[in-house]
Amino acid sequence: MKYYPLVYGHRGFPLEAPENTIPSFLLAREAGAFGVEMDVHMTKDGELVVIHDDKLDRTTTGTGYVSQRTWAEVRQLDAGQKFSERWRGVKVPSLREVLTQVKGVNYYVEVKHGSRFYPGIEERLLEILEETGTKDLTQVISFDLESLSRLRQMDSSLTLGLLTCNDVKHALVLADEIGVNWIQAEFSLLDRELVDMAHGRGYRVATWTVNSEEEVMKAREIGVDSITTDNPRMAIRVLSS
């Protein structure tokens, strides 16, 4: 690897393939991404599936909430044709499928809702990471403070990242309370002073969504450790030059 900060594909490579699908993650890997970012929800029968929204409508041929469908029902849906005809037939993957079929990268796994909405999701997630041997390659990220706290209580060695769209200084206070390892802040919130502050308190800093050459250069200049981008090929080209 000849570049820094690390580059993660946001939901894979969503400019070239349907977001949060196996082809999208594989394209990000082929582009040279260090890792891929994905979102998980839980089906009615307890399967963790990789999809951004809590409803199926935007990205699939289905309707309604993921939580009200079984894995077999979700599996029947098409997650590609709304992106383009080329990807017709692509399915919503389970988390297990992504972790076993997309090798050679690291993973950001975002828990969209914790146990208040998906009872037992943290236990299920840890089971899958252990069974697939990917725990050491994975950072679990979330806005959900209860979910992160629960995960930390369950596993002291799991890498955790606190997502924030608000005050980074306040996020650092919360991070201290929960015991996370990374701060994951929306790009417009960050400057060199805040990144240095986080580093000084022992946290690494990731940011999203970094989608222009200028933003990539700024991210490097302010010292972040990782960027998440819709265009990993562009980001790697800029950082490698």
Image (cartoon, rainbow, N blue to C red):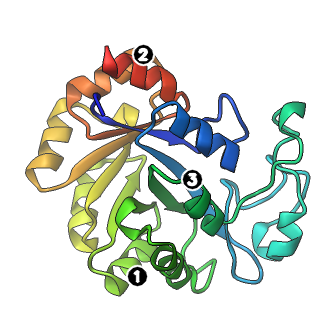
Given contact means CB atoms under 8 Å apart, are the residues at marks 1 and 3 in contact? Answer: no
Say what amino acid the circle numbered 3 marks: Val
Q: Which residue is mark 1?
A: 150
Kind of residue sitting beneath label 1: Arg
Q: Quadrant of residue 130?
A: bottom left
Of residues 15 and 206, the one nearer the viewer is 15
49 displayed left or right of 204: right
- Identify which amino acid the numbered label 2 is placed on: Glu
Earlier sequence position, callout 1 versus callout 3? 3
Instruction: Give the residue number, with chain letter if any, for mark 2.
Output: 213
Asked which secondary structure carries label 3, the reply is loop
Q: Residue at x 42, y 15 (%)?
A: 213
Real-space Cα separation, disc 2 to disc 1, in angstroms: 38 Å
Foreground tag (1 vs 3): 3
In this rendering, the count of numbered labels is: 3
| Residue 64 locus on image (x, y percent) | 86, 63
Task: Look at the picture and state if 85 lies above or below 62.
Answer: above
Mark 3 packing: few (<14 Cα in 10 Å), some, or many (20+)? some
The reply, left or right, for residue 118 in relation to residue 126 is right
